[in-house]
Amino acid sequence: MRIEGRRLLRALVLLLWAGFFFYLWLSGASTKFIGPRTSWVVPFGAIALGLTAACQMVTIRRAAARMVGAESSGVKPGVKPGVKPGDAFGILLLITPMLVLVAVPDAGLGSLAASRKTSGEGIAGLTSILPPEDPDHEISFADIDWASESEEYAVKAGISEGLEMDLEGFVTGTGEGTFSLTRFYVSCCAADAVPYSVTVESPDHYDDDTWLRVSGRLGRAGDEYVLIPDVIEPIDVPKDPYLY
Amino acid sequence: MLDSQTLEGRRGARAISAPVAVASGAAVLGLTLGARTLGLTESAALQTFTIIFSAIVIEALPFILLGALVSAAIEVYVPDRAFERVARLPLALQVPGAALGGFAFPVCECGSVPVARRLIARGMHPAAGLAFMLASPILNPIVLLSTYIAYAGRGLGWEMVAGRGLLGLILAITAGWAIGSDGATDLLKPRAEEVPSHDHGREGAGERRRAFVEHLAGDFFFMGRFIVIGAALAAAMQTLIPQSLVSGVARTPIVGSLALMAIAFVLSLCSEADAFVAVSFVQFPLGSQLAFLAFGPVVDAKLAFLYGATFRRRFVLRLVIVAVPVVLAGSLWFEAVVR
């Protein structure tokens, strides 16, 4: 039975992508790329790509059977089996994201990305943004940042000097007796991540991108809320590196 | 309607033999694993690029598949007479009607391109097809809902929804009319590998199912490769260019709107979530944020490649020439009304 190469390659690429989406879905690894608002694309992609791959497989069998039938009756097939250079290049392009992820296993947003992206600083000072009314809302980087900009926000969020905090983030620069602890907030995917930083008053030196858990209490340096640490400990990169 | 000769293009290229294909695949895999083993991929820039690039592709591919699904369904299951009926309507009715039709198509910009291409290829007037393509990523209910949610916290939910919907509609109709006056053959780029468009109405159920799968896979593979190139460009720009370069000069409405249009082009965000990013640009006037929300779903780095693959030369340039003044005027008007 002669199989048309282009259909076969397409089916294999669809299977690869379906497998990759299933992996992202079942392992929870999708949180590295996609936020919860759009996380539905992962199971949808896994199932839809899997079904499309299965349908493409069926057409391979039928096309091959038709080709055999046509050849046995002396008719030349309209489409020759085989992969043309243009098809091969297109298929290579489509698997490039998976190849890049294999080549760069530690891909992630760190201090370089934080220096390139627009920070969300200043929002509360310029607008009437208020803390969420959710009673389970956990105070974190953005809240502290906005509380430094707006006293109204600080009061409504319950942020004040002496508040005990426990923050996990990565280092994005050191100053005199301080360093910045940063975390990205994601709306949709890593492409829209916005960095928020909290200044930690500590003479210790940490390399950029070192992940730390800092426990302590809030203090003030001018208008800015800063974190005065009791305990600083290095941690592994969390499975879900973003906040939402 | 496009004839099969035009769309069939040339099919003369020689096929690659199986041993060459297997050897090439092995070489690519070997290079990938070699780079990883030798630690050539440990730079921070490459790690940043990879995560942004992969995130855009992972998010966009399911939408491309959804668009290809609808496109294949239109090709195989909608008879020619339906398009003939639509084509008989006056253009003054077709264009706004098609733009408003975007309200019923809940996918982002990646999915609307193959659908619009198929509609135009099947006989819809290009102006109407373009109006649909440009309106659906802005007017669809999911996008409007996400815009409301993003801005409701600032008490501006309905204002932004109304502004975005209205500006998106005006932009789609204006650009559709301005660019879509050419015939379909002057607008659409031929695709060498495409199965020619024809009425599948007389084929049996099995034959139609096979045609549906062929068109679905064809559109997915064609659009998918350009999404990959566009995502790579967007990720490279995000990795190399600090956004503060643009945002630092953005206090006035005109400069602010132009700057946020430039940022929208670079970021290449999905229109279903871009409002959550726009709301964080508080250094910019509200009208400029609206410019970001109206321009991004119509022109961005990843779309430029999709458009380049779908339409003939200069389409992107013509679209930018129409879109920038329309969005700028709309954003200034919105700023004056809402402030």
Image (tube, coloured by chain):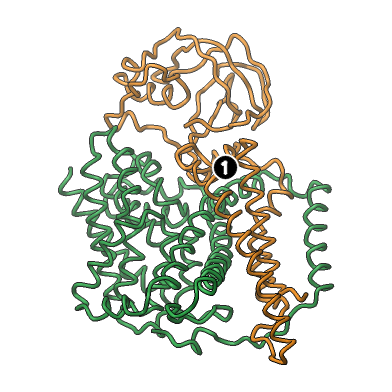
Q: Is residue B41 above or below residue A177?
A: below
Letter of the chain shown orange in the rendering = A
Q: Which residue is mark 1?
A: A33
The structure residue drawn at horizontal position 55% and vertical position 26%, both measured from the top left corner, is: A180
Q: Is residue B183 above or below residue A183?
A: below
Per the image, label 1 sits on a secondary structure element best described as loop
The image shows residue B36 at horizontal and vertical percentages of 79, 48
Q: Quadrant of the N terminus of chain B?
A: bottom left
Q: Quadrant of residue A94?
A: bottom right
The amino acid type found where label 1 is placed reads Phe
Depth check: A202 or B230 in front? B230
Colour chain B is painted in: green
State left or right for residue A200 relative to residue A85.
Answer: left
The image shows residue B74 at horizontal and vertical percentages of 41, 69
Depth check: A17 or B185 in front? A17
The image shows residue A77 at horizontal and vertical percentages of 68, 86
The structure residue drawn at horizontal position 41% and vertical position 54%, both measured from the top left corner, is: B264
Residue B316 appears anywhere in the view:
no
